[in-house]
Image: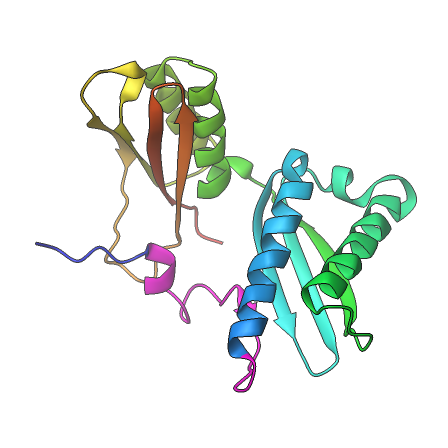
């Protein structure tokens, strides 16, 4: 039986960097939980902006949060008002998680646009998830996602659905692949995401691998 390793974790260092960059040997559990809370809150608040990745970098007295979104205009708002509102929201959230402690670190929030959303595995998987929840035919959804990714310059894409697809009585797996997706080649930029879709008949698991174009 083969061991399945997350393609991003497999490439940490040579290709990808860590999503959280900090060192804390005394309050590791508290800081980790804080990162999780921040990511969950930002993803929920910026749902309409198409958040794909949130990076958190900490130093002694500062936190830098970088959000990678497909629609940066929604986050920034008119004259940067949206960004200021987001900063105030996160400050209040940190005060709650730290139970009212006054010495909050300086917060720096940045928004980075995703140039090709069709080459981002999380955004592709989320789009498939939303369409499945709206009871659209799965074969058409998968075919359109593959077509868009390949036309955007992907070298390969693989989509796997698992569960009661189309409301079937018995769960099954369906796979669609086009191009090459070499998971064992470390130098390849493989974007991977696993997203569930809650349908009326239960959860359908969605996994997407995209072999992105060379940068």
**Residue at x 40% of width, y 20% of height:** 141
Image location (x, y in percent) of residue 156? 33, 39
Specify the quadrant of the image occupied by residue 73: top right
In the image, residue 138 sits, relative to residue 79, either above or below, namely above
Residue lying farthest to the left in this orientation: 1
In the image, residue 167 sits, relative to residue 72, either above or below, namely above
Image location (x, y in percent) of residue 215? 49, 54
Magenta span: chief secondary structure: loop
Image location (x, y in percent) of residue 91? 79, 61
Does residue 160 appear in the picture of this structure?
yes
Does residue 68 appear in the picture of this structure?
no
**Residue at x 67% of width, y 37% of height:** 49
Is 121 a magenta residue?
no
Front residue (pair 43, 4): 43
In the image, residue 79 sits, relative to residue 128, either above or below, namely below
Would residue 60 appear left or right of 193 to someone viewing this image? right
Specify the quadrant of the image occupied by residue 181: top left
In the image, residue 8 sits, relative to residue 129, either above or below, namely below
Q: Which residues are magenta?
A: 7-27
**Residue at x 27% of width, y 23% of height:** 164
Labels in figure, total: 0
């Amino acid at each position: 039986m083969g061991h399945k390793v997350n393609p991003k974790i497999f490439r940490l260092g040579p290709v990808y960097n860590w999503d959280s960059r900090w060192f804390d040997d005394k309050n590791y559990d508290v800081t980790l939980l804080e990162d999780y809370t921040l990511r969950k809150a930002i993803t929920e608040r910026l749902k309409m902006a198409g958040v794909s990745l949130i990076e958190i970098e900490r130093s002694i007295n500062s936190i830098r949060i970088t959000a990678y979104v497909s629609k940066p205009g929604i986050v920034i708002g008119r004259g940067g008002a949206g960004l200021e509102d987001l900063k105030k929201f996160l400050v209040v959230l940190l005060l709650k998680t730290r139970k009212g402690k006054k010495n909050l670190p300086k917060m720096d929030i940045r928004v980075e646009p995703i140039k090709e959303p069709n080459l981002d595995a999380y955004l592709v998987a989320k789009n498939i998830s939303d369409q499945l929840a709206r009871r659209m035919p799965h074969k058409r959804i998968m075919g359109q996602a593959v077509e868009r990714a390949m036309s955007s310059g992907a070298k390969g894409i693989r989509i796997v659905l698992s569960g009661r697809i189309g409301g079937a009585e018995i769960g099954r797996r369906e796979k669609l692949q086009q191009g090459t997706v070499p998971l064992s080649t470390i130098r390849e930029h493989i974007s991977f995401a696993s997203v569930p879709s809650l349908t009326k008949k239960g959860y359908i698991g969605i996994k997407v691998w995209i072999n992105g174009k060379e940068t």
